[in-house]
Structure formats: structure tokens, C-alpha cells
Amino acid sequence: MSHTYLTTEQLSERLHYDARTIRNQLVDSCLLEGRHYLRPFGRRKMLFIWENIEADMLQAVSDSVAMPHFDAGV
């Protein structure tokens, strides 16, 4: 499987979040190292794995959609 690696700035354009918000609030709370991003060659720079981020966002949306409950006795 091939991956699309994005810089913080490229991810911010796709998600419409400020790059600073991604670095300071989402990394290590919503975005996990090894799953959503990596640090190539042990450096500071992060590369984000778009396919994993997108899959988890879509999964969160489908998990949060409540199915209506119909009572057959009513």
C-alpha cells in the first residue's frame, strides 16, 4: 500500500486547521506517532500519513452517527 506523506503545512491546507494547532493540540492527542505521522531519520520534522488520518476521521464520523431507535411496540 502506498502512502501520501504530507508536511504540517500541507496537512493544514487539507484539514483547514492552522499548522500551529496541528502541532500544539492535535499531535499526540488525536494524531499518534507511528499511525498518523512519523519523524523520518529521527529528526524534528513530522510527515503525516494522509490515508491513515483520513480513514480515522471517516471512522469517527460513522461511529458518531446515531442510528434511530424504533420501538416495535409503539
Image (spheres, rainbow, N blue to C red):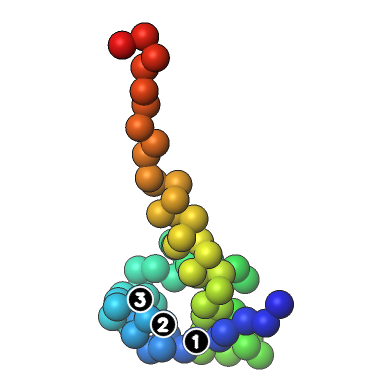
Give the alpha-carbon distance from disc 3 to disc 1, as whole Å: 12 Å
Label 1 CA crowd tier, 10 Å (few <14, some 14–19, many 20+): some
Q: Which mark is residue 6?
A: 1
Q: Position of residue 1 (x, y in %)?
A: 71, 77
Instruction: Report helix, strand or loop for mark 1.
Output: strand
The amino acid pointed to by label 2 is Leu
The amino acid pointed to by label 1 is Leu
Q: Which mark is residue 15?
A: 3
Q: Are marks 1 and 2 in contact (CB under 8 Å)?
A: yes
Q: Is residue 21 above or below residue 55?
A: below
Residue that mark 2 sits on: 11
From the viewer's perspective, is 7 left or right of 71?
right
Residue at point 58%, 89% (across, down): 43
Query: Which is more N-terminal, label 1 or label 3?
Result: 1
Q: Are marks 3 and 1 in contact (CB under 8 Å)?
A: no
Give the alpha-carbon distance from disc 1 to disc 2, as whole Å: 6 Å
The amino acid pointed to by label 3 is Leu
